[in-house]
Image (spheres, helix red, strand yellow):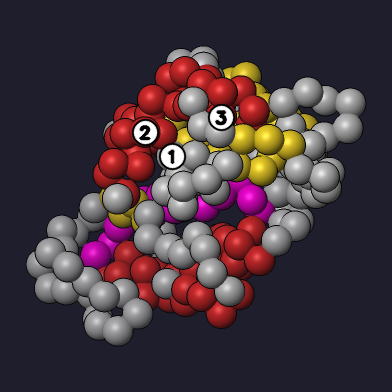
Amino acid sequence: MRWDMLADPPPIGLPQGALVLHLAGATRGAERDLQANVDLVPPLLRMCRRIGARRLVVLSSAAVYPPGARLAETAAPDPPNAYGRSKAQAEALVRAQSHTPVTILRPGNIAGADALLGPRAAGEIVLDPVPGRPGGPLRSWIGARVLAQALAALCRRDDLPPVLNLAQDPPLPMADLLEAAGLPWRYGETPAAVPVATQDLGLLRSLLPLPPADPARLAAEAAWARGVLA
């Protein structure tokens, strides 16, 4: 069953009372391209109302947070870039309605679908340095396979919170993943604009403990994801 969410009404035959997992969206491009993240929400909500969805689970992003360490779900959104702003606007629209229970998932960097280890042109990677911190910017990560398994497990639960961070502990510096992936890289001259962006995962651990973040495993999952996305 296919549905062009921005052009067509919801298809006939969608199951009544279903859980809806919303993964569609834009991750790159100019601000007008990223507006799709917001524009997708009204047709999504109309579909949920039509089928009497029992819950809407929306994959958002940790990019809605301001830079910082161990940010919890209660932190106020303050995104530093256009992508994060589009996701924060989409979140606000979803949470403003009252006809469908909502859970917003905020994953960390998804290894293999991100700007560091995702599909890219061949060549040396230039990593922004962080003064006083070896390894460059520090991020919370989640592997593509672990993400898929976590989504499946979470969608089977009836006790999901309104907002949930989704990543593997501990946070890792970007250089560790580049080394594990065997990719050529060097430090650039300009310090990282966002040296630290990590998440508090206490709530996630109480619901669904995930395996520890390991550079070699994340690099392997990134290679798998690049093959899927190619």
Residue type pointed to by label 3: Leu
The reply to whether discs 1 and 2 touch (Cβ–Cβ < 8 Å) is yes
Residue sitting at x 51%, y 21%: 180
Query: Mark 1 — residue?
Result: 112
Residue type pointed to by label 2: Ala
| Residue 153 position by quadrant | top left
- The image shows residue 12 at horizontal and vertical percentages of 12, 73
| Residue 129 position by quadrant | top right
Query: Which is nearer the N-term, disc 3 or disc 1?
Result: 1
Report the Cα–Cα distance between label 3 and label 2: 12 Å
Choose between 208 and 191: the one closer to the eye. 191
Inspect the magenta stretch and tell me whether residue 59 lies in it: yes
Report the Cα–Cα distance between label 3 and label 1: 11 Å
Query: Mark 2 — residue?
Result: 223
Query: Mark 3 — residue?
Result: 178
Q: Is residue 135 left or right of residue 46?
A: right
Q: Is residue 14 left or right of residue 115?
A: left
Which quadrant is home to the N terminus? Answer: bottom left
| Residue 227 position by quadrant | top left
Q: Which residues are magenta?
A: 51-64
Residue sitting at x 82%, y 45%: 189
- The image shows residue 145 at horizontal and vertical percentages of 34, 31
Q: Is residue 132 above or below residue 113?
A: above
